[in-house]
Image (spheres, rainbow, N blue to C red):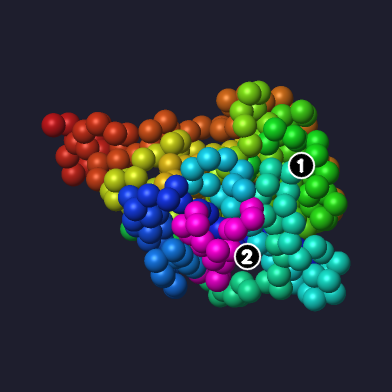
């Protein structure tokens, strides 16, 4: 079984400023720095997934052109659970966008914790215990990748041949794929937008629960990073999100509570619309200090107090 993303690799735009910003960004994002040299930094999530940031002249990138100019995503490594399956997959390939795709025996670590349970009506799971408040996020794993594509049918066929399964789709516009029959709603989303060239849209990082989405987003706001959209909720996958602009290409997302699918799932088709993308979302994010929309006054000690 392909169980998910083991690592991703970005390349910077080659400037010293972008290199410094990239390192600070992923530390603020909640990743752990595990390796550093003058042309490579490597970060780790809680379960051992890796994020590599390379200078564009790094030797490992030689002979492979980027999908787009400037800082961008260069490689996705998918983790496989057994050697027999690994032997049937290509050691390395380029997808139709020029993104390098590799497979390896998964190096992810098993983790012994869980997010805060919810007390849905009629199903009380949390008793004599408050939900957590997070001062920052510490991502568990790399959840999914979203690519802009200019060759949607070819891209879908490429990943289906590798064993990916369509979860849902916007016909002729976007396709959600999961890397195994049983798992999260999607590990890859291919989005075709008229007159939009190929490239990275975003990478999502999974956190424990909705409370960590909020805590992480507020911490990133306090660190000075710019929200693109969020917090909010995707109705297609049921996941909560918060998107930020990422210095090494596209956007980056905190993500939690997505749907879990099995072989019994029947792929759906949707017409694109703002409400289909987000049931609700805050444009511009929340200020990490006032805990309200930017430029809104916090008030007194209680929400009901007026200044």
Residue 177: x and y, percent?
Answer: 74, 47
52 inside magenta stretch: yes
Residue 41: x and y, percent?
Answer: 44, 65
The disc at residue 95 is: none
Q: Which residue does the numbered mark 1 point to in the structure image?
A: 155
Looking at the image, residue 268 lies above or below residue 274: below
Question: Which of the two residues, 28 or 104, is positioned nearer the viewer here?
Answer: 104
Q: Is residue 118 visible?
A: no
Q: On the rendered structure, is 66 left or right of 221?
A: right
Residue at 78% across / 74% down in the picture? 82
The disc at residue 6 is: 2
Q: For the residue labelled by badge 1, is the local secondary structure a helix, a strand or a loop?
A: helix
Q: On the rendered structure, is 154 left or right of 16?
A: right
Residue at 49% across / 43% down in the picture? 70
* Dominant secondary structure (helix, strand or loop) of the stretch shown in magenta: loop
Write the start and end of the magenta stretch as one range: 45-64
Q: For the residue labelled by badge 2, is the local secondary structure a helix, a strand or a loop?
A: strand
Looking at the image, the residue that sits furthest to the left is 307
């Amino acid at each position: 079984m392909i169980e998910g993303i083991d690592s991703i690799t970005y390349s910077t735009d080659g400037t010293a400023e972008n290199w410094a910003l990239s390192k600070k960004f992923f530390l603020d994002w909640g990743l752990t720095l595990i390796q550093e040299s003058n042309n490579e930094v490597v970060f780790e999530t809680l379960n051992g997934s890796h994020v590599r940031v390379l200078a564009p002249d790094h030797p490992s990138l030689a002979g492979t052109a980027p999908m787009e100019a400037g800082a961008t995503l260069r490689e996705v490594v998918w983790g496989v659970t057994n050697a027999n399956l690994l032997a049937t997959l290509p050691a390395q390939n380029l997808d139709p966008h020029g993104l390098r795709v590799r497979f390896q025996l998964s190096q992810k670590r098993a983790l012994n914790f869980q997010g805060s349970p919810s007390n849905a009506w009629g199903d009380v799971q949390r008793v004599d215990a408050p939900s957590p408040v997070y001062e920052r996020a510490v991502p568990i794993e790399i959840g999914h990748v979203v690519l802009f594509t200019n060759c949607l049918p070819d891209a879908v066929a490429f990943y289906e041949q590798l064993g990916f399964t369509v979860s849902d789709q916007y016909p002729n516009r976007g396709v959600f794929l999961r890397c195994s029959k049983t798992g999260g709603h999607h590990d890859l989303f291919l989005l075709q937008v008229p007159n939009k060239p190929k490239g990275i849209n975003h990478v999502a990082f999974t956190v424990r629960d909705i409370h960590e989405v909020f805590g992480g987003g507020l911490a990133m706001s306090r660190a000075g990073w710019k929200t693109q959209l969020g917090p909010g909720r995707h109705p297609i996958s049921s996941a909560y999100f918060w998107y930020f602009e990422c210095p090494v290409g596209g956007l980056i997302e905190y993500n939690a509570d997505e749907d879990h699918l099995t072989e019994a799932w029947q792929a759906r088709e949707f017409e694109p619309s703002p409400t289909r993308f987000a049931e609700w979302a805050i444009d511009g994010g929340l200020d990490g200090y006032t805990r309200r929309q930017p430029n809104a006054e916090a008030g007194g000690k209680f929400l009901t107090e007026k200044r």
